[in-house]
Image (tube, grey):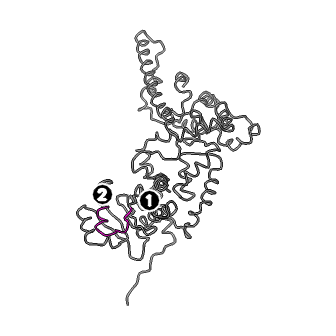
Amino acid sequence: MSKCMFYLIGLQYFSLVIDHRPLVPILNHYSLDAIENLCLQRLKMKISPYIFTATWRAGKVLCIPDALSCSPVDRPTSDDEAICNKTCISVSAVMLCAVKTIAVPCVNEQDDLHLEDLHKAASEYTKYRDLLHHVRSGFPNDRYDLQNSLCPYWKIRDDLYCGGNLVLYGARMVIPTALRCCILTRLHDSHCGFEATKRRVRQTVYWPGIDADILNTICACEPCQILQPSQQQDPLASDDYLSVSADFFSVAGKHFLVYVDRFSNWPIIIQCGTDTTARTTIRFFRHLFRDLGVPERVRTDGGPQFTSQEFAAFLERWGVCHIMSTPHYPQSNGHAEAAVKKVKYFTLKTVPTGNIDHEAFERGLLELCYTLNFAGCSAQIFFGHSLHSCVPAHAKSFTKEWQSRAESCECCADECAKDVETRYNKPSKQDPELFLR
């Protein structure tokens, strides 16, 4: 790190790959006062100016550092020096290329109008400039020497760092006070509940007391309070990710078709007007199969459109299995019912007239898709990469390895599904077997 200090100082993030696994938690999580070994203390002090994440890799695959550490050259010859010079030039070129690659998102940040407003507010707000100064130069040793307005940041002072003229907390941007009301409004465009909005906030923005502000915003929203369900019930998760759910609902006399992918929960809303016949439903499904792919199973509630012979013949031609819920028991089609309830409440809150050709509806539906579910993933996995919305987000939040993220989300979803199923089946009892005499 000291030899590459010119390239590493000031980087918002880089990876340190080591072949000694016990060092990983010490370098990543331990503070200086928690380390008793003097050698490790000195090491921690020397690398404290850098922002990095230590990862472990076996020595047999960490070829170059392992070879240099096992077979060093004490007395280099002229040939060794020539090779060393060429290697240094190559390493320098690779490092410069890596630095340019990392710096590209930061340059393009200024093209984001939301970030321009954020930079402007950060430069005009005195308390935010004071916070930026302390993050750059260091916080005082005693919290009582800090301004009262910056005391809420004391507990997270070690996790704050600078990204240009902004203060970052992980991948989340610290928002100045002047823009917090506007950000809360943007976050509540989807009219989700408290927990769902908190999961969305964990991706983008931060300020002290943001959870309380979110709760107050939701409590002050009149449509959310009027349409709040009287008996909230957690949805029962399913491990069936190769199927879709569909159902109809109506708002202000207008009928809508909801088509939801069961893995990503990405909703497709189609306005049907007053025509909900089987032929029109087939036309909608044909377009959806063309654009989104053909599922293995379609789950519906067995409405007249879905039970017609024409619709059954259409699904048979496309090789799709049709599964209908039990009559008078809508819980058997819980995924579609939950999606319809969410979309219907969202429509009533944003466009009570039923006219979905509206900016508030489109912007809110975008935030609804980006909100994390209980498994820690959002409908963005439908595209396999992160997308931009009206909520400002730092460039770092778009640089994740989405393939590994999708796999981890899938594993997390499986674990959550098993946990929900266990808790759901715990109070139930097996019916006793009936014997005929």
284 vs 176, left or right, is: left
Measured along the vertical axis of the image, is residue 311 above or below residue 376? below
| Residue holding disc 2 | 287
Measured as percent of width and height from the top left, residue 150 is found at 70, 41
**Front residue (pair 328, 421):** 328
Element marked by disc 2: helix
Residue 295 rendering spot, x and y as whole percentages: 31, 58
| Residue range (magenta) | 271-284
Q: Is residue 91 above or below residue 257?
A: above
**82 in relation to 322, above or below:** above
In the rendered image, which quarter is residue 44 located in? top right
- The amino acid marked with disc number 1 is Ile
Q: Position of residue 420 (x, y in %)?
A: 49, 63
Query: Mark 2 or 1 closer to N-term?
Result: 2
Q: Residue at x 45, y 60 (%)?
A: 417
For this view, does 184 lie left or right of residue 92?
A: right
Locate residue 128: give its quadrant.
Answer: top right
Considering the image in quadrants, where does the N terminus appear? top right
| Mark number displayed over residue 14 | none
Apparent side of residue 244 relative to residue 355 in the rendered image (left or right) = left
Q: Position of residue 428 (x, y in %)?
A: 49, 73
Task: Please name the residue that numbered disc 1 is placed on.
Answer: 356
For the residue pair 282 and 160, the one nearer the viewer reads as: 282
For disc 1, the neighbor class at 10 Å (few under 14, some 14 to 19, many from 20) is: some
